[in-house]
Image (cartoon, helix red, strand yellow):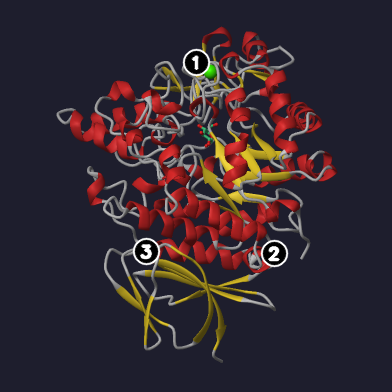
């Protein structure tokens, strides 16, 4: 198997708006990232993925790009970005950017041209269609729904036509079947690589091809059904990616990680990113994000993890990619509720937080930590719908309210539990005013629990979650276990257990036994098949073994170097 630099990296995802505000205007910025490079270096990561900072009207917090070659004023300047790249590289930290290629902002000059007339040379940069006449009224060309609610089409009066937009009205979809669009996007990628970035996280990459314009099947009363099959993982996506890879990515040693949304199966993942796919280095999948009852509950204390489903997901991806590809390892990103509020246990935050970290970081792949995960940040205690900033959270609230107009409280609770604003609150650097994120009232929300959960406090306690992350990263990057952690095989054990997620990592030299209890209950793990050589990392100071039985405390997590008794 070929080895690439990114297989040996540990990544960290930054949401610039809420990471660190360097100039006290209440908004995180590029300089703020540069100022925190030492922090990241101390944590041990050597690859950062930065969410969009391009010039944008910020309808979708920067995923609606107005100018791919400029930086949003609130985030800084191109010079700030150059400085960041340079300083990061000096510290041995690589940088990848978000490459947003499915859509632009409706304020992008291409779209302004495109909508001005049917003959405009930019018209075919986007997906236009005439409306359909139903009962004498003009309606959308199809009934397709969009990810952020409502129709996947928007009406444009100037030319009396509809354009496709599978996210927001202000994010028209690009027409990838047009080679000129491909050319333009190639130039954008090249330009950023020339500036020194080391690769891309590719946004919404599975949506670049569209199905024939036939209505989607709708449930009773459903006007705009969201049918992923109409715009996900369709054949021509692969042609487009092969061209990008050939003309840009494979010309350099860059890394590419495609975001393949919820409906992508492992088979699709392999098509995009197996070593011989000639498309992407890796894909982010979301299968492990839905292994709990988050969508059914209205109170966080009711949260329950389906341990078997969760480990089944991890196991299936790990196994499928075994010899043929590589995976990123991340619990969540800027689009999901916080890890501690999804899979953590509020009664055992420290033990469960460390266990979750170990469970993920010991797998085969490239770990990505989402900002604040390393200190156990949690969801925000939303009290009012006006606190939502994210378009999809607001749409979600409206959706629930429409179903039950009498019950705004439940609508708020449901929307809050799943809100993308949860991971986007200000990074909690200290217990100071505004969490040490800014010296003025920040634009992003500040979670009141920053008094307790913050970087400063974590750094002052040797047994904090932060140091556990640091230790995991150090094991992977610098220890004698480096080889086996990075390149060793993965094998699930205790498959039927509903309490434990345990697996083996092996290479010719060493075997690691990774045991994670996902339970509040005490439990035992049978060690009689193993001879323990060393306790590599654990989340409790003492380990209790009697008669070859490991007695696990709530959420206990241990990695042993072992020899198997064969
Ligand atoms: C991706 C991003 C998300 C954004 C969407 C549209 O899913 O992660 O934040 O809203 O694409 O660009
Ligand atoms: Ca700022």
Ligand 2 within 8 Å, label 1 CB:
yes
Give the percent coordinates (x, y) of residue 489: 63, 71
In whole angstroms, how far apart are the C-alphas of marks 3 and 1? 43 Å
The residue nearer to you, when weighing 313 against 13, is: 13
- Establish if 436 lies above or below 297: above
The residue nearer to you, when weighing 387 against 546, is: 546
Q: Which residue is mark 3?
A: 307
Q: Are marks 1 and 2 in contact (CB under 8 Å)?
A: no
Q: Which residue is mark 2?
A: 324
What is the crowding at mark 3: few (fewer than 14 residues within 10 Å), some, or many (at least 20)? many
Q: Nearer the viewer, mark 3 or mark 2?
A: 3
The numbered mark, 3 or 2, whose residue comes first in the sequence reads 3
Secondary structure, mark 3, is helix
Q: Are marks 3 and 2 in contact (CB under 8 Å)?
A: no
Give the percent coordinates (x, y) of residue 469: 51, 52
Examine the rendering and report whether any part of residue 105 can be seen: yes
Question: Does residue 565 appear to the left or right of 270 in the view shown?
Answer: left
Numbered circle sitting on residue 312: none
In whole angstroms, how far apart are the C-alphas of marks 3 and 2? 27 Å
In whole angstroms, how far apart are the C-alphas of marks 1 and 2? 48 Å
Location of the C terminus by quadrant is bottom right
Give the percent coordinates (x, y) of residue 370: 51, 42
Q: Which residue is mark 1?
A: 24
Q: Give the residue drawn at x 33%, y 58%.
A: 305
């Amino acid at each position: 198997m070929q080895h690439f630099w990114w297989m040996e990296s540990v990544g960290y995802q930054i949401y610039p708006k809420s990471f660190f505000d360097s100039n006290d205007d209440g908004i995180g910025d590029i300089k703020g990232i540069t100022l925190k490079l030492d922090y990241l270096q101390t944590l041990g990561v050597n690859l950062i993925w930065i969410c969009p900072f391009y010039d944008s009207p910020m309808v979708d917090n920067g995923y609606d790009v107005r100018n791919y070659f400029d930086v949003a004023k609130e985030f800084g300047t191109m010079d700030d970005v150059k400085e960041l790249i340079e300083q990061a590289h000096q510290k041995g930290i690589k940088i990848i950017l978000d490459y947003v290629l499915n859509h632009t902002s409706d304020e992008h000059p291409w779209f302004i041209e495109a909508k001005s007339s049917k003959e405009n040379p930019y018209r075919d940069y986007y997906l236009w269609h005439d409306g359909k006449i139903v009962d004498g009224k003009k309606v959308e060309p199809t009934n397709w729904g969009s990810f952020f609610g409502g129709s996947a089409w928007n009406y444009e009066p100037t030319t009396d036509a509809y354009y496709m937009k599978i996210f927001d009205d202000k994010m028209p979809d690009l027409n990838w079947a047009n080679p000129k669009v491909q050319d333009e996007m190639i130039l954008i990628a090249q330009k950023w690589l020339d500036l020194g970035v080391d690769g891309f996280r590719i946004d919404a990459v599975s949506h670049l091809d569209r199905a024939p314009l036939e209505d989607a099947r709708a449930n009773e009363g459903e006007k705009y059904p969201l049918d992923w099959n109409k715009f996900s993982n369709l054949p021509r996506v692969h042609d487009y990616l092969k061209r990008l890879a050939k003309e840009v990515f494979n010309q350099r040693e860059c890394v590419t990680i495609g975001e393949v949304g919820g409906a992508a199966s492992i088979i699709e993942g392999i098509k995009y990113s197996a070593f011989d796919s000639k498309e992407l280095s890796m894909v982010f999948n979301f299968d492990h994000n839905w292994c709990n009852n988050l969508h059914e509950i209205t109170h966080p204390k009711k949260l329950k993890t389906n341990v078997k489903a969760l480990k089944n997901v991890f196991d299936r991806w790990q196994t499928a990619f075994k010899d043929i590809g590589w995976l990123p390892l991340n619990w969540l990103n800027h689009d999901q509720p916080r890890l501690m509020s999804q899979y953590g246990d509020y009664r055992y935050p420290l033990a469960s937080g460390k266990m979750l970290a170990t469970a993920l970081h010991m797998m085969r792949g490239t770990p990505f930590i989402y900002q604040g995960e390393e200190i156990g940040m949690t969801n925000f205690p939303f009290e009012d719908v006006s606190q939502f900033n994210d378009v999809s959270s607001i749409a979600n609230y409206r959706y629930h309210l429409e179903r039950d107009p009498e019950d705004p409280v439940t609508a708020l609770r449901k929307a809050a539990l799943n809100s993308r604003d949860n991971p986007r609150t200000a990074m909690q650097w200290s217990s100071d005013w505004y969490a040490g994120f800014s010296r003025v009232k920040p634009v992003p929300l500040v979670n009141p629990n920053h008094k307790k959960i913050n970087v400063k406090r974590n750094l002052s306690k040797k047994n904090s979650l932060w140091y556990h992350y640091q230790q995991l990263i150090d094991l992977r990057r610098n220890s004698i276990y480096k080889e086996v952690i990075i390149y060793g095989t993965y094998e699930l054990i205790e498959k039927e257990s509903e309490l434990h997620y345990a697996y083996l990592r092996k290479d010719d030299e060493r075997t690691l036994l990774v045991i994670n209890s996902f339970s509040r209950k005490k439990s035992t793990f049978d060690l009689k098949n193993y001879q323990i050589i060393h306790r590599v990392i654990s989340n409790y100071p003492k380990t209790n073994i009697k008669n070859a039985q490991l007695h696990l405390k709530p959420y206990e997590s241990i990695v042993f170097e072992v020899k198997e008794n064969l």
